[in-house]
Amino acid sequence: MKDFEALVGAWHGEGEMAIDPPIKLSEEVTIERLGEFIVFSTVGEPAELPDSIAIIGGAPAGEPQPMYYFDSRGVKRMFVTAIEGSTWMMWRDPAEDWNGPDGPGFNQRFIGEMSADGNTIKGRWERGMGNAGDEWEIDFPMTYVRK
């Protein structure tokens, strides 16, 4: 979990969903250590952006970590997350979803780059398209700034 220590703290995130009309996103994020786990919680605006909590950890040190995600819509998802250098990645595959065939049915990932001073993360959520789900399109960008 040592790799995730750089994320611990309070963050403000902003982004925009490119729909018609575009929706501006804003969220307050708290990332904290809880024993051998990292707890990631968000409260967002507008109402379409769900509040969420995720628990990261459980795999051996140095390996990608499982991330269990829950949100105010009742959605629960299993992701895998890793930090390599300054890149933070989260990804999921419908076959690994708790909801099985009743899940959202698409691949999903987040890729974020942390600034050299550790105070900004510029990232994007992407969804897998195409028959195999391996053609990626940006769902929405997010930038996080440490408070």
Image: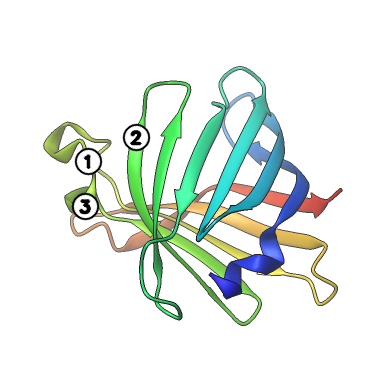
Disc 1 marks which amino acid? Trp
* Color scheme of the displayed model: rainbow
- Marks 1 and 2, how far apart in space? 7 Å
Disc 3 marks which amino acid? Glu
Is 137 displayed left or right of 119 in the figure?
left
For the point 79% across and 61% down, the residue is 120
Q: Do the CB atoms of the residues marked 1 and 2 lie less than 8 Å apart?
A: yes
Which mark is first along the chain, 3 or 2?
2
Examine the rendered structure and indicate whether residue 44 appears above or below residue 39. Answer: above
Question: 55 or 99: nearer the eye?
Answer: 55
For the point 48% across and 43% down, the residue is 54
Q: Secondary structure at mark 2?
A: strand
For the point 81% across and 77% down, the residue is 116
Residue 96, numbered circle: 3
The crowd level at tag 3 (other Cα within 10 Å; few <14, some 14-19, many 20+) is some
- Figure disc tally: 3
Disc 2 marks which amino acid? Lys
Is 68 displayed left or right of 30 in the figure?
left
Q: Secondary structure at mark 1?
A: loop
Task: Answer with the quarter of the image where residue 76 lies.
Answer: top left
Q: Residue furthest left?
A: 101
Examine the rendered structure and indicate whether residue 49 appears above or below residue 29. Answer: above
Q: Secondary structure at mark 3?
A: helix
To which residue does mark 2 refer?
A: 76
To which residue does mark 1 refer?
A: 98
